[in-house]
Structures are given as C-alpha cells and as structure tokens.
Image (cartoon, rainbow, N blue to C red):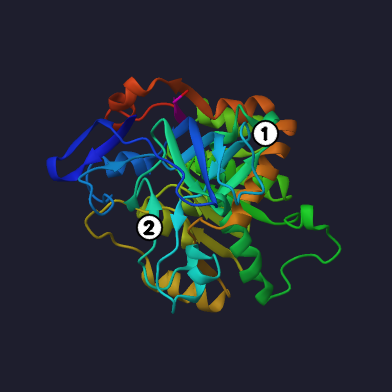
Amino acid sequence: MRAVGVVPGEREVRIIEHAAPRIAASNEIKVRSLEVGICGTDREICTFVYGSPPDGFNYLVLGHESLGQVVEVGSGVSQFKPGDLVVPSVRRPCPHDHCLSCRDDKQDFCFTGDFTERGIKMTHGFMTEYYVDEEKYLTYVPPELREVAVLVEPLTVAEKGLAQMWQVQQRLPWIDPKLSAEHRGRGKTAVVLGAGPIGILGAMALVVRGFKTYVYSRSPRPNAKSELVESFGVKYISSETVAPDQLLEQVGNIDLVYEAVGKAKISYDVLRVLGLNGVFIFTGIPAPRPPIGIDADIIMRNLVLKNQAVVGTVNADADAFAGAIRDLGIFLKRWPDALKSIITGRHRIDDYRELLLGKANGIKNVIAMA
C-alpha cells in the first residue's frame, strides 16, 4: 500500500510502500482510510523534533486524525460490521502491570510514559490505505456526520479538557445548581486562545454549554477565521491590537481560559489576567524554543489569592471520542456552514509535501485517501 511517512535516519518525508495489514486477533478490525487530517503535530514531526518509528522499522507512517470505513471484522467483534464509519483513538497503553491508569483503559493518564501513539510515537498512523486496530479503540460515526467526522479527533482535545475542568471546579460552588447539565456554563466567561481547528471547535463546545465565549488570536480582524467564529456568536479579539490587560477590561472576570495556540508567551500573558476562581486549560505542546520571561511573581500570587487552577490535558479516552461525536451532531444542526468551513481543503495523497512541508494555509486541510 501507499503511505506517507517520515524516515528520521534520513531526515526524509516521502511516499512509502507499506505492507498491507491483516487481522491477527479476534478483537481486531480492518479499516479503509477515507480521510486523514493534517495538523501541527504532523508538521512538527516532519521537522524531526520528535516522532519515533515502531521497533523494527526505519520509518513512521504519519496521521492521527482519521475517518475510516470498516471492511473486515474479527470473529470476536460485536459492535461493528463492514460498512460502518469509524474514528480511531491515538494513544495506546503501556505494557506495565503497575500502571493503574493503563490497566483501567485510561492511557491518557499513563504513569510510566511508555505509552505509544499512532502516527506519533512508536506505532504507525493512519495516513495509508488500510489499517488494523482493536475494537475498543474505534468509535462509531453516524452516516450523517460523514462530511465532518474527520474533525472528531481534534474536538476530543476540547472534550477531554472540559471534562477535566468540570472535575477540578467541583472544589468550589462554581456552577449554579439550578442550571441543567447542558447549560451549566451560563453566567461564565471563557476565552479561547487561538483560532485554529482545536480553538474553533473548542469555542463551539463552550457556546453549546452556555459560556459567553471570546476567541483571542493573533491576526487582526476581519479575516476568514474571525468571520467564522463570529458566525456562531463568538467575539473575535486580536492580540495584535488588544493587550491582555485590555482584554480583561473588555470581557470582565475570566472564568476559563482554553489554550489552543501552543505558544508559551501569549499563554502566560493571559494566565496573568485569569479571574477569581478561574481555571486555565493547557492543550498545546510548544516546539523547543529559547526561554522566555514571564510575570512569575504576579502569576504565583494570583494562583494563591484568587484560588485559580491550571490544568494540562491530553486526549485519549473513549468518553472524549463519544462526546466529540455527540457535539459534532449538535454543531452540524446549529451551525452547518461554520462547521463545514473548518475543513478548508480536501487533497490527494500526492499533495503531501505541500501540506506537510509547505506554508500552513487555511484552517484544516485533509488528505482524502479514498
């Protein structure tokens, strides 16, 4: 089969002839790749700052944002049949018996660091014609979501982050008990850092939950991203024209910051203006850069005196994927044009070099494998 991969030893990104997979266990499923999203992680792997091949291979097949279709199931599979649409999760558990998280299928909280990740760390990804995976790592996609389902994996970043936020904020009476679970963010203000796919999808998730939501991103408005977020009721504010202290003046007490920009400087500048009892969710993984200066004394004082919490989150669990499927259905009904416009281009596999090595363009680019 054809696949797109990196060869770290040769510092190359290329089309690779990759062996076709076969079902080898009763709980396995063979899937035909339909679409694979391109994200910043893929592009960073192509600069060789990280990304390690599986044992016995000199290359790593890329791709972790995938939509596929079941073509064959093992004898022990009960939840899927040929023809079903599915999205795979990314992280796989470590092998150690003493890692309670991995043994409980919560590999996103692995204690050892010896987990693997498809398309990222020691396990081939989905940017190929077919792959095989275990049943428990696949989530069913309703046919009506076919056009947008490749967005499930990036949306799980927000789903997992918000799930962690609700758990953390149980430390205080933060939620109005009279509000329903669907609207428990009502009366709260959220700021999303970044207007990429993870930021835009996170903003949609926050609006659905009732938060008054702002997107704080670099490019001055108007631009395509500002128009997109404002089409579903979110105010876009440019960090180029509005400093963090001015942001605070405009939006009032900031209850939640959802970081989706992967840049330390702007993140810590906004952490400095986080509000009373606020929570800051970090989701980005910055590329290695020289150290930066931050207002450490102010941030530390605020964390203590304002009862703030800072949470880092990584997505992997089944609940996050199920939540993303549910929310995509809601988004598609409420904002069909906005949701579909997040995918700004569908491309052939032969366009991989431009997508992975060229200048980043658009919001979410997708390789249509079939």
Judge the density around disc 2: few (<14), some (14-19), many (≥20) Cα neighbours within 10 Å.
Answer: many
Res. 99 image quadrant: bottom left
Classify mark 2: helix, strand or loop. strand
Res. 110 image quadrant: bottom left
- Looking at the image, residue 122 sits to the left or right of residue 254; the answer is left
- Looking at the image, residue 56 sits to the left or right of residue 256; the answer is left
Q: In the picture, which quadrant includes the N terminus?
A: top left
Camera-near label (1 vs 2) is 2
Residue denoted by label 2: 116
Classify mark 1: helix, strand or loop. loop
Judge the density around disc 1: few (<14), some (14-19), many (≥20) Cα neighbours within 10 Å.
Answer: some
- Looking at the image, residue 356 sits to the left or right of residue 226; the answer is left
Q: Magenta residues?
A: 364-369
Residue shown at 65% from the left, 43% from the top: 325
User: Against 69, is 312 above or below?
Assistant: below
Residue situated in front as seen by the camera: 103 or 256: 103
Q: Please, what is the three-letter code of the amino acid marked with disc 2? A: Thr
Q: Please, what is the three-letter code of the amino acid marked with disc 1? A: Phe
User: Against 223, is 298 above or below?
Assistant: below
Q: Main secondary structure of the magenta part?
A: strand
**Does the image show residue 14?**
yes
Mark 1 or mark 2, earlier in chain: 2
Residue denoted by label 1: 232
Residue 335 is one of the magenta-drawn residues: no
Q: Residue furthest front?
A: 75
- Looking at the image, residue 146 sits to the left or right of residue 6; the answer is right
Q: Position of residue 12 (x, y in %)?
A: 18, 36
**Does the image show residue 220?**
no
Q: Position of residue 141 (x, y in %)?
A: 64, 38
